[in-house]
Image: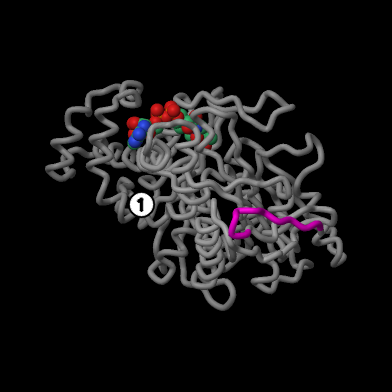
Amino acid sequence: SKNVGILAIDIYFPPTCIQQESLEAHDGASKGKYTIGLGQDCMAFCSEVEDVISMSLTVVTSLLEKYGIDPKQIGRLEVGSETVIDKSKSIKTFLMQIFEKYGNTDIEGVDSTNACYGGTAALFNCVNWVESSSWDGRYGLVVCTDSAVYAEGPARPTGGAAAIAMLIGPDAPIAFESKLRGSHMAHAYDFYKPNLASEYPVVDGKLSQTCYLMAVDTCYKHLSDKYEKLEGKPFTLIDAEYFVFHSPYNKLVQKSFARLVFNDYLKDPSSADEIAKEKLGPFATLSSDESYQSRDLEKASQEVAKTLYDAKVQPTTLVPKQVGNMYTASLYAAFISLIHNKYSTLDGKRVILFSYGSGLTATMFSLQLHDGQGPFSLSNIAKFPPEKFVEIMKLMEHRYGAKEFVTSKDTSLLSPGTYYLTEVDSKYRRFYEKK
Ligand code: ACO
């Protein structure tokens, strides 16, 4: 089958969220540290009535309904998650409740786990299945679902929560350029979850930043080398329209793109413009280890990259800045931000994605976009999720610390016996009901 890739995408994130500005104040961090320093606006989190399973049930049901997909048409379902609820039973098996009802239990695939990379592994598995001789003609379905929470301390503002579902098949508006891929996998203790009794990771923040940036560089080099073998010329940033990154927090995305600009400069200093030559020239002789420690290089390359960043990366940052790090869902939430912002101009364009999971596993890969037709079109993908998202965000910004409102009382997601908020009156008194 041809042009295998993503036919449809849907996202769900919990309506509960916290403004980074108020978290800053609450944590006693200096003003601007989370909003400007990390570049984050808001952070979603699961309240006690939601978790990675409920979020993935919600998003899968929603995708099937929106795109009119008969649950019998799904032949493979793969889940990426690093939020361990059960050490043996996969999240995939919880999702089978949706399909069993329709008599479909003939669905391959289980869960993939390695920090934020599991969703990409699941995606590659589904794409490979559709391209393989064992494909039976039905759709693949990929689910990325995570609740990212950190212990109190500097990592806490880099949490988030969401679930993404992606429908996989041939003739897709978002097709894989499978030859154009570079990976970097190594052993590191930058972020891990050895304490099975705790939801919180053990994290070496500084090391995780360096590991991430080294993985960006190495994957970019592998991808460029493969491109050069195929096309007979080096790959540079002008060869793709947009760059989408796994987004723990926006500042790291800015630094990552600046690394790519620095890489292009090192590849061919003579073709750089005068400003780049002047600003990046002094760093050309740094060893790669030194280059990760140099704050001056970080500043200079971010300055040089600014205009390109605004054009090629900024349109991908909407959802990650508002919802936070969604772990496995983060990269794909950045990608749907791009579709939401630019869907009418993406036909024929190449987009490069970078997936990173601590520990560590990373891949940079390429997608070719086409307008598509019918339900499986970019304009249709663009239509749903972010509009609902902006609506919820507006509501929550307004609701946070507010008074005098009644809630939707929409308890369709809650199980019997659960209490839910119905009203906050003019004296900030909160009223609850039991389902
Ligand atoms: N106004 C503006 N900027 C500020 C302010 C302020 N008042 N205060 C600090 N800053 C800036 C800092 O200069 C820094 O920016 P810079 O790197 O451009 O200089 C930024 O805010 C962050 O400040 P730091 O002191 O570096 O932050 P800290 O070390 O306390 O925590 C960290 C940041 C390490 C990212 C932490 O949140 C963390 O450990 N997060 C989890 C790990 C993570 O997400 N790693 C990413 C890859 S792995 C993964 O995906 C899980």
In the rendering, at what x and y percent does residue 25 appear? 45, 37
Magenta residue span: 425-434
Q: For residue 296, which quarter of the picture?
A: top left
Q: Nearer the viewer, residue 100 or 139?
A: 100
Could you tell me which residue is drawn at 28 percent across and 37 percent down? 262
Q: Which of 240 and 83 is in front in this view?
A: 83
In the rendering, at what x and y percent does residue 128 appear? 63, 52
Q: Quadrant of ligand 1?
A: top left
Seen in the picture, residue 378 relative to 329 is either above or below; the reply is below
Q: Mark 1 points at which residue?
A: 231
Q: Nearer the viewer, residue 92 or 272?
A: 92
Q: Is mark 1 on a helix, strand or loop?
A: helix
Which quadrant: the C terminus?
bottom right
Q: Is residue 20 left or right of residue 150?
A: left
Q: Is residue 106 left or right of residue 151?
A: right
Tell me the kind of residue under disc 1.
Answer: Glu
In the rendering, at what x and y percent does residue 240 appear? 36, 55
* 132 in the magenta segment: no
Q: Which residue lies furthest to the front in this view?
A: 427
